[in-house]
Amino acid sequence: MKELWQSRTSFVLASIGSAIGLGNIWRFPYVCYECGGGAFLIPFLVALLTAGIPLMVLEYSVGHKFGSPAPLALGSLKKGFEILGWFALLVGFGIATYYAVIMGWAFNYLRYSFNLAWGADTQGFFFNQFLKLSESPLQIGAVQWMIALGLGLTWIAIVASIWKGAKTVGKVVYFTVIIPWVILLVFVVRGLTLPGALEGLKYYLTPNFDALLNYRVWLHAYSQVFFSLTIGFGVQMTYASFLPRDSDVVNNAFLVSLADAATAFIGGFAVFSTLGYYANQSGLPVSEVVQSGPQLAFVTYPTIIRLLPFGSMVFGVLFFLMLLTLGIDSAFSLVEAGAASLIGKFKLKRIHVNIGFGVIAGIVGLTYTTNGGLYWLDIVDYFMNNFGLLVVGILMCVAVGWFYKHDEIREYANSKSDFTIGKWWDFCIKYLTPVVVGALFITNVVDRVKAAYGGYSRIAEFLGGWLVIIAFVCVAIVLYRKKGRT
Amino acid sequence: MPISAWIMFAITALVLFGGIILCLVKIKIRK
């Protein structure tokens, strides 16, 4: 029997949980600061309204209309597009394999928080003691067993969360969405009451309107919205396929997209107020302490936590608990979309698919727990997002905008929804989003032709980037050609 | 913080949180 969400709240929370991830905290505030501060909020809101929300409406509408997971729903638009659906899910699976490793780090740091084990040299602790990072990706070294243990725990949590599909996911998300929101608010309040907080916020919000004349700032805004909403993985499409037939589409898409953007916006207050405090305590300007990504979460934040006037241990535990709960629902949504698709097409048993996913992804993930693991994580992350995901985004718009009656999709969405969308949606899907995302893709290709990503060797870039993409395309074709069971 | 920063803050908060409230109100009306 087809899995269905038990309530609209379950669906909305699951979808929000999938969209909100680590990037809302460690990517958005930094991109905002780098791209004109408060002025960046203009292209960000424009990108949200012209690409983020339209794509979310597209994914929900297609998933809901055809009532099947991403590959099968896209295959209903036009048969060959099933390959696109499988490729999207494989990109999501690729991301889940290293996302789980980052959560494995967070599990370890949660434990370290109890005695602030990272000490004064948080940089040395993270890179030398914890990761035991080698000199280059080709010096892969050995598996770090504490990280592997964290990875194992993460996969147990992911598999348990999707154990009975939408039924268990719908319950777990009440915790994994609400807990990080509450903790984030605690950090905002704590941050704003620290000395130097306003100085930090000045860096976050003071607008430099000249930045709006730079086309790359606009591309950054579109890429931020695109990556942040978990669109292009087929996750939202698959989640929408679990909705009952009379469910809303448009209002849910607006609600989820706005909630995701609001979380990132609020996340900036937590990050920059504490960075202001750090600058105040260290005597450095905010511009010298600002960081993003793992460096922010596992080096800068532990330093700030240690400097707090009281309750360092409590805030350390809360911070890493927030990272874990923020990340887990994004990770299991990627896995659930794949699991539901395999079950949908090949009628496999859920228990076999769940355990199979956990074991295979866990073994693949061990690569990132080695001494050279961080480099591979960085390369795979860049290629999955900047090539895999962008290609899916462009082709998804092309599939609906050019190879299907897009007005039929819009009318379907409107017929189900609390409020309706106009023809602006058709314009966004048919022209605007493919052109902007296409420009992003071309910019990335040109950058990579000029030089290998991140200063790595061409061989490392090929193995961690292009080869993975080629392998995923091949597997997607095999899954498409393999006959499903009825 | 300069006044321009406060204005950007107010506009963004209004769009995002105003939008969320409108969506929730629509849900309430439908019920």
Image (spheres, rainbow, N blue to C red):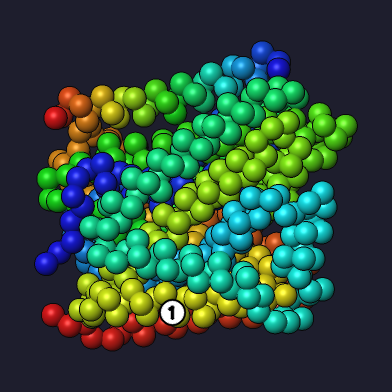
Image quadrant holding the C terminus of chain A, namely bottom left
Considering depth in this image, is A267 or A42 the residue closer to the camera? A267
**Mark 1 closeness class: few <14, some 14–19, many ≥20 residues within 10 Å:** some
Report the residue at 15% width, 41% height from top.
Answer: A415
A322 with respect to A416 (left or right): right
Q: Nearer the viewer, residue A176 or A149?
A: A149
Where A391 falls versus A35 (above or below)? below
Q: Is residue A231 visible from the viewing direction of this image?
A: no
Determine the image quadrant of residue A107: bottom right
Instruction: Please tell me whether residue A329 is drawn above or below residue A151 in the rendered image.
Output: above
Horizontal side of A16 relative to A436 (left or right) equals left
Q: Picture coordinates of residue A258 (x, y %)?
A: 41, 35
Residue at the limit of the structure toward the top, as seen here: B3
Residue A477 drawn at (x, y percent):
38, 81
> Residue at 15% across / 29% down in the picture?
B30
Q: Residue A144 placed where, x, y %?
A: 66, 75
Q: How many marks?
A: 1
Q: Position of residue A375 (x, y in %)?
A: 70, 69
Q: Going 41% across and 48% down the picture, which residue do you hit?
A: A176
Which secondary structure, mark 1?
A: helix
Chain letter of disc 1 in the image: A
Position of the N terminus of chain A, as image quadrant, is: bottom left
Disc 1 designates what residue?
A359
- Give the residue type at disc 1: Val
Q: Residue at x 82, y 31 (%)?
A: A281
Judging depth in this view, the residue of A380 and A323 nearest the camera is A323
Identify which residue, A312 or A423, lies in the foreground: A312
Q: Is residue A271 above or below residue B10?
A: below
Left-right relation of A83 to A141: left
Residue A347 visible in the snapshot: yes
Locate residue A141: give its quadrant.
bottom right
Residue sitting at the far right: A283
